[in-house]
């Protein structure tokens, strides 16, 4: 094979566009100047704004020696001898070479550029490559884009990326996804923070918005839409988001952002509230070998509230007509405690037996069930309005050798927020920590980390409130709530009242003594109940942990004559520990072990075509091993114009919850697929049957213990290229995939008395929601189109449109695809205008189509949503500060992006950022 | 600076146009509409007011303070309403004939509005209101009738659930208790009106009150006391007396007159005496003497014959566990179980039959299993003679009494 086909990395560096590679390599390779003697120092300034430019890569041409400018733009580098040529490079600036022949201060006027598509991404192939040459769809968010975004937090920026849907459970709890399956606890989309899987091991949702990075510390976010488990393991069926923090060697000094805002300005949910978001980052390079970083963030505001008071038929899984006034069996979506329901006919029949003269009359009332629900409390009444999020993280970085860096890092976060699962959960004093040790070499990485979850005082709103109702007045019994209700209902019926008025009157009687929200008597009981674990209270005692060890080795230095080869392996162990409050682990914690190995080989077949093949084998102790291959090809049509084609497979083992959850939701039980649960519920002797079929007169017995991992085979064809004199970046893709053994849930029913099943059991039996594999292939397909156009004078326009679809879903499956068929983002911005080019603005618009949302809490149609975000910023170069006036949902048009979630309005803020890179 | 301001203008304009596009704002969540047809037409009160022939009854509704109730469109009622002529008959009776039936309506109306005690008016109107919409077609024709509670609670302090009940039936025509319905299904937005031929009056006393005080039912009373003597103490739950005083009971008592008891007892005792070897003439004389007073049931000499259990068996054979007015009787001879069936489930019961005149029952019979002939219900001398004077369809809170001219024999004596 000719040498010029497999190009050495250094050869690439000669190309102007590839200087940026050094920036990245600088992370990987130790570029400190060991034992060198001529020191060159100076300062780098922006030639337009005259502000200091920090984190500029400074390298000596022809060597691996390099450093970065500090937060004042100053650098200092040692060379063996003079003259040398220094190469200055940084994203957003034209690279510059400066010849230095004498040991004097060498200052550089660095010229900003607006070149498109030049960013380097790592996650698509596990090696650095130009984003234009990525073999699969990838989006990248840089620190610069975070700086100029109108969003109040970087998760909102992710929402503007092509093909991304975000589910907002609360102000501080946002869950992104690509290619469908949105939801607070999305298990098909992985989030990795500095290489660590960020999913809470017990609750199965990603918590990067709670304990992840703060916006000052984000170097970049890479988002792989589409199947990605061939590279990143189980999960990632739909995508993987990798967040990478800034190296303390490169970005130094103290920086902070103080963001002060206001929300709830129309006071429709509650009084206008302030919004505080303070971020801090401090990094210090003590020597070329040792650097330290500490970051912290505090967010405090009054949260958005779920105000969906529509009536919900929980066992039927659909909305129904009526309100608390008109439906005695009302069960509001964001109303809790009203999940407890009962038929008052036994009460009426009891009266009929005691007072036979009423029996004929009562018999006219009891021809069908009279189901009534306990009176609930709204989310607004119950939930602690104060959302607080505090994060702190720190890391120590030590260069053991020129090429090997050791990192010890801790990420810890706590806060109050709201999560949507089978109910709304108030995550109160929720704590999660991730701790890792890592060795990074140019050719290999070794990493071990653990995730330690502590649900704190978190509680399930529905369970807590249901038990609270039992505490102030028990439902059963001769003097219980239902007895009082039934008797009062009958009294009203005997007075001729309509059913509706009789129910209202009966409720009034049964609710005598109902504690008023906010009173001491309410709080005393409620606080006691929410701390008691379910089923007696609503508390969640989750202390689940995850332990991971992983490593990979780039063998390219040995194998480069054939191909670039990377191998890797990982080992995972989950320890589920909810003391029976979430999982079937009331006796002992449940351990789940997984391991995986992978290999990837890539080769430039011709100067225009690069092929990569990778394969991965994973084994979970409860499931058979899985092999997942991936093949990609990138064809360079002309420079900066690439066509990509990929075949990817992805799989995921059933989530921990799908295996082991055991949650009594009163109207039904949400259970996992592990055989132990099937034994516990005696499904062998007293089988369960598909409820919908049973109601239609057919008996289809549910089999247990056969749950298989879900897998996806996906093809993607895409094009990314620069046209119109490199002013327009186009990215377009289409994908088609097929899920096999698609994991979904089904409602099944079991006879209450152990007798053979009858059709009536469809209404009266024990109801379970069980995970199942679809035996038909479920098809997913979609496309995306992104356009970025750079106008003169630093203006730019961007636009993206994406569509995601799922078809062939069997009718009695709850797929929870939860993605609008179409969504688009458009933005108009300027990064520097005015006389001194210190002003910037962005106006961003998002629209998404209406869609039918399916979740464990509720299903229902969501109307289309549009939002407008905007920001205006002023740079203050002398202090490297930015003053920003921003608004998200500028028009304060409240919207939901999931049924049962918070209703989101406008947030207006002003922020001051100091020493922002 | 001019250029800059242009940029500002342009940016502002783009932002403004974006806002204009957005003026179609985010939609509210879809609401699931409930289909509840709005009630149409006049309320019950307005319907009565619209009919001049209901004016006297409407006056009584007003006197009772129940106009608001029947105009409550949030409630549903069935009203049984006598027309003005029926109300005149009522006023005539209520005034002991002081106001002639033929008196001008103004006079009747004035009596109702000014003189009739409010409590009485409330009782009368309340007893004629069923708290449900019952169309004529909804009223069953099954024997004997359908027991509907009215809105009249005789003892609210005892229980909010107490109600006097009423007994519509569509067997043999259409009836409320023993009063014919003349015109049915007059619609109103909050219910329905049926006209009754006469004002249906609520019962006030209990079955035992009548039996205990009626000078023509002294044997029945003594028999009940004798029957209860096996269940101590007297009046305790489970006794017949308790049942006859129980507001929740719902019974029909076929009450043999004293003469009927005398005849049966005389015959029965004579049979026993003859069986003991007493010559028939002597036996008859002795038996006649023994049976000449109700004390016959307390005579220790007869305790072996008239045991408490035997007497109880005979008494409960005279009681139906349902309230049957004579108009509820089948027109063909039909067997009906009695309370005796709770002890002897296979017992055939009694045979009931009624013959109708216009519109009331002209004859009604009850036959015991071992009677040779039918017992006749002693039909009132004229229709609708209420408690305490009548002999048939005597209505009480917990049942109805039909006097009969024979003792019903359940088993061979």
Image (cartoon, helix red, strand yellow):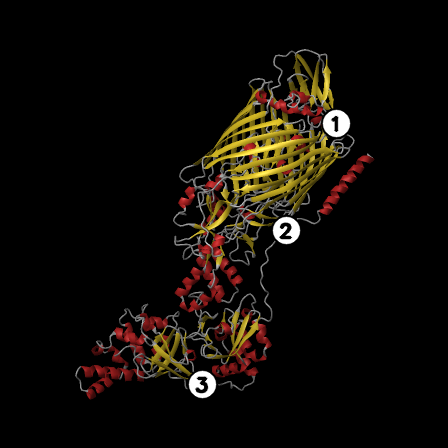
| Numbered tag placed on residue A49 in the rendering | 1
Given residues A127 and A633, the one toward you in this image is A633
The verdict on a common chain for dots 2 and 1 is no
Residue of label 3? B357
Task: Reply above or below: A48 against A164.
Answer: above
Residue located farthest toward the right when viewing the structure as drawn: B2
Which quarter of the image is occupied by the N terminus of chain B? top right
Q: Are marks 3 and 2 in contact (CB under 8 Å)?
A: no
Quadrant of res A566: top right
Q: Disc 3: which chain? A: B
Q: Disc 1: which chain? A: A
Counting the numbered discs, the total is 3
Q: Are marks 2 and 1 in contact (CB under 8 Å)?
A: no
The verdict on a common chain for dots 3 and 2 is yes
Task: Reply above or below: A747 against A66.
Answer: below
x and y percentages locating residue A297 in the rendered image: 59, 32
Task: Reply above or below: A339 against A637.
Answer: below
Label 1, secondary structure: give it: loop
Q: Disc 2: which chain? A: B
Given residues A386 and A572, the one toward you in this image is A572
The verdict on a common chain for dots 1 and 3 is no
x and y percentages locating residue A207 in the rendered image: 55, 36
Q: Nearer the viewer, mark 1 or mark 3?
A: 3
Identify the mark nearer the N-term, 3 or 2. 2
Residue located farthest toward the bottom when viewing the structure as drawn: B281
Residue of label 2? B28
* Left or right: B133 in relation to A897: left
x and y percentages locating residue A141 in the rendered image: 65, 33
């Amino acid at each position: 094979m000719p040498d010029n086909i497999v190009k050495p990395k250094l050869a690439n560096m000669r190309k102007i566009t590839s200087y940026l590679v050094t920036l990245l390599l600088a992370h990987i390779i130790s570029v400190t100047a060991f034992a060198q003697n001529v020191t060159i120092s100076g300062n780098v300034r922006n030639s337009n704004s005259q502000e200091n430019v920090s984190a500029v890569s400074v390298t000596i041409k022809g060597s691996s020696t390099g450093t970065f400018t500090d937060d004042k733009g100053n650098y200092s580098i040692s060379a063996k001898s003079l003259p040398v040529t220094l190469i200055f490079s940084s994203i957003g600036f034209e690279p510059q070479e400066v010849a230095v022949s004498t040991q004097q201060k060498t200052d550089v006027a660095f010229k900003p550029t607006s070149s498109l598509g030049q960013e380097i991404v790592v996650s698509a192939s596990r090696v650095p490559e130009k984003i234009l040459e990525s073999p699969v769809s990838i989006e990248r968010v840089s620190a610069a884009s975070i700086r100029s975004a109108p969003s109040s937090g970087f998760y909102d920026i992710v929402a503007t990326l092509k093909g991304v849907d975000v589910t907002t459970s609360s102000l501080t709890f946002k869950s992104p996804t690509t290619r469908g399956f949105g939801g607070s606890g999305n298990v098909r989309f992985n989030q990795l923070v500095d290489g660590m899987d960020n999913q809470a091991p017990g609750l199965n949702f990603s918590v990067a918005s709670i304990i992840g990075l703060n916006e000052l510390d984000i170097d970049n976010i890479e988002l792989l839409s589409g199947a990605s488990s061939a590279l990143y393991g189980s999960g990632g069926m739909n995508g993987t988001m990798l967040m990478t923090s800034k190296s303390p060697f490169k970005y130094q000094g103290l920086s902070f952002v103080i963001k002060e805002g206001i929300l709830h300005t129309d006071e429709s949910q509650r009084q206008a509230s302030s919004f505080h978001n303070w971020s801090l980052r401090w990094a210090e390079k003590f020597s070329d070998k040792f650097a330290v970083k500490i970051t912290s963030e505090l967010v405090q505001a009054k949260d958005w509230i779920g105000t969906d008071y529509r009536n919900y038929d929980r066992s039927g899984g659909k909305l129904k007509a009526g309100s608390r006034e008109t439906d005695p069996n009302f069960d509001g979506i964001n109303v809790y405690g009203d999940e407890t329901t009962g038929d008052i006919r036994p009460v009426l029949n009891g009266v009929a037996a005691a007072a036979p003269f009423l029996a004929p009359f009562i018999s006219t009332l009891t021809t069908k069930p009279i189901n009534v629900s306990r009176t609930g409390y709204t989310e607004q009444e119950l939930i602690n309005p104060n959302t607080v999020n505090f994060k702190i993280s720190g890391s120590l970085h030590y260069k053991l050798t020129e090429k090997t860096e050791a990192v010890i890092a801790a990420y810890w976060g706590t806060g109050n927020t709201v999560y949507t699962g089978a109910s709304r959960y108030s995550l109160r004093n929720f704590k999660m920590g991730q701790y890792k040790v890592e060795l990074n070499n140019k050719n290999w990485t070794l990493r071990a980390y653990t995730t330690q979850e502590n649900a704190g005082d978190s509680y399930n709103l529905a369970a807590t409130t249901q038990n609270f109702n039992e505490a102030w007045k028990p439902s059963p019994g001769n003097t219980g709530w239902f007895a009082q209700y039934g008797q009062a209902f009958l009294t009203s019926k005997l007075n001729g009242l309509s059913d509706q008025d009789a129910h209202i009157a009966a409720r009034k009687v049964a609710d005598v003594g109902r504690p008023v929200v906010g009173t001491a008597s309410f709080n005393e009981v409620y606080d006691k109940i929410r701390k008691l674990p379910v089923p007696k209270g609503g508390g969640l005692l989750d202390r689940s942990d995850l332990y991971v060890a992983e490593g990979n080795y780039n063998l390219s230095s040995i194998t480069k004559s054939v191909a670039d080869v990377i191998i890797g392996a990982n080992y995972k162990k989950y320890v589920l520990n909810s003391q029976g409050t979430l999982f079937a682990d009331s006796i002992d914690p449940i351990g789940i072990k997984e391991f995986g190995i992978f290999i990837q080989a890539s080769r430039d077949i011709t100067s225009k075509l690069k092929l990569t093949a990778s394969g991965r084998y994973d084994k979970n102790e409860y499931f058979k091993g899985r092999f997942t291959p991936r093949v990609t090809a990138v064809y360079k049509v002309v420079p900066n114009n690439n066509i990509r084609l990929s075949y990817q497979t992805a799989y995921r083992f059933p989530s921990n919850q799908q295996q082991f959850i055991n949650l009594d939701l009163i109207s039904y039980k949400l259970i996992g697929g592990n055989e132990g649960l099937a034994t516990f519920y005696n499904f062998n002797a007293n089988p369960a049957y598909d409820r919908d079929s049973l109601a239609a007169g057919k008996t289809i017995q549910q089999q247990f213990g056969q749950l298989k991992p879900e897998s996806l085979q996906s093809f993607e064809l895409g094009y990314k290229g620069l046209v119109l004199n490199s002013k327009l970046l186009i990215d377009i893709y289409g994908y088609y995939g097929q899920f096999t053994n698609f994991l979904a849930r089904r409602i099944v029913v079991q006879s209450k008395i152990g007798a053979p099943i009858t059709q009536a059991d469809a209404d009266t039996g024990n109801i379970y929601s069980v995970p199942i594999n679809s035996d038909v292939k479920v098809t997913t397909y979609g496309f995306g189109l992104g356009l970025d156009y750079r106008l003169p004078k630093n203006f730019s326009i961007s636009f993206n449109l994406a569509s995601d679809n799922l078809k062939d879903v069997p009718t009695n499956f709850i797929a929870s695809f939860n993605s609008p068929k179409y969504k688009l983002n458009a933005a108009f911005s300027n990064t520097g205008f005015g006389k001194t080019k210190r002003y910037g603005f962005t106006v961003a618009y998002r629209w998404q189509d209406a869609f039918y949302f399916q979740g464990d809490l509720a299903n229902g149609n969501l109307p289309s949503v549009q939002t407008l975000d905007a920001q205006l910023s002023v740079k203050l170069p002398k202090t490297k500060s930015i003053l920003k006036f921003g608004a998200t949902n500028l028009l304060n048009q409240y919207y939901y992006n999931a049924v049962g979630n918070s209703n989101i309005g406008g947030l207006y803020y002003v922020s001051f950022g100091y020493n922002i890179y | 600076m001019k250029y800059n301001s242009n940029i500002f203008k342009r940016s502002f304009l783009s932002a403004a146009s974006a806002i204009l596009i957005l003026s179609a704002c985010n939609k509210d969540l879809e609401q699931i509409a409930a289909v509840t047809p709005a009630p149409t037409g006049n309320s019950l009160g307005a319907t009565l007011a619209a009919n001049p022939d209901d004016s006297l009854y409407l006056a009584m509704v007003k006197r009772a303070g129940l106009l608001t109730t029947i105009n409550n469109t949030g409630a549903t009622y069935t009203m049984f309403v006598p027309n003005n002529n029926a109300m005149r008959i009522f006023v005539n009776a209520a005034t002991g004939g002081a106001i002639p039936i033929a008196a001008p309506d103004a006079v009747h109306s004035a009596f109702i509005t000014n003189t009739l005690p409010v409590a009485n008016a409330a009782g009368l109107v309340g007893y004629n209101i069923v708290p449900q919409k019952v169309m004529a077609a909804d009223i069953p024709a099954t024997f004997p009738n359908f027991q509907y509670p009215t809105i009249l609670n005789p003892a609210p302090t005892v229980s909010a659930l107490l109600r006097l009940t009423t007994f519509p039936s569509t067997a043999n025509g259409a009836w409320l208790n023993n009063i014919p319905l003349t015109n049915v299904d007059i619609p109103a937005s909050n219910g329905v009106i049926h006209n009754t031929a006469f004002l249906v009056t609520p019962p006030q006393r209990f079955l035992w009150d009548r039996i205990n005080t009626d000078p023509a039912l002294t044997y029945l009373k003594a028999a009940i006391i004798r029957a209860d003597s096996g269940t101590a103490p007297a009046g305790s739950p489970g006794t017949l007396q308790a049942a006859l005083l129980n507001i929740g009971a719902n019974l029909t008592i076929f009450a043999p007159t004293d003469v009927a008891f005398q005849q049966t007892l005389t015959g029965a005792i004579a049979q026993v005496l003859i069986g003991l070897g007493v010559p028939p003439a002597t036996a008859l004389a002795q038996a006649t003497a023994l049976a000449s007073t109700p004390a016959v049931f307390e005579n220790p000499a007869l305790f072996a014959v008239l045991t408490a259990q035997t007497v109880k068996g005979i008494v409960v054979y005279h009681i139906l566990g349902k309230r049957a007015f004579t108009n509820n009787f089948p027109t063909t001879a039909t067997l009906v179980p009695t309370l005796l069936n709770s002890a002897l489930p296979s017992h055939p019961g009694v045979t009931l039959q009624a013959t109708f005149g216009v519109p009331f029952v002209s004859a009604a019979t009850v036959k015991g299993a071992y009677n040779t002939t039918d017992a006749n219900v002693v039909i009132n001398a004229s229709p609708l003679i209420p408690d305490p004077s009548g002999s048939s369809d005597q209505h009480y809170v917990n049942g109805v009494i039909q006097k009969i001219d024979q003792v019903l024999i359940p088993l061979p004596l």
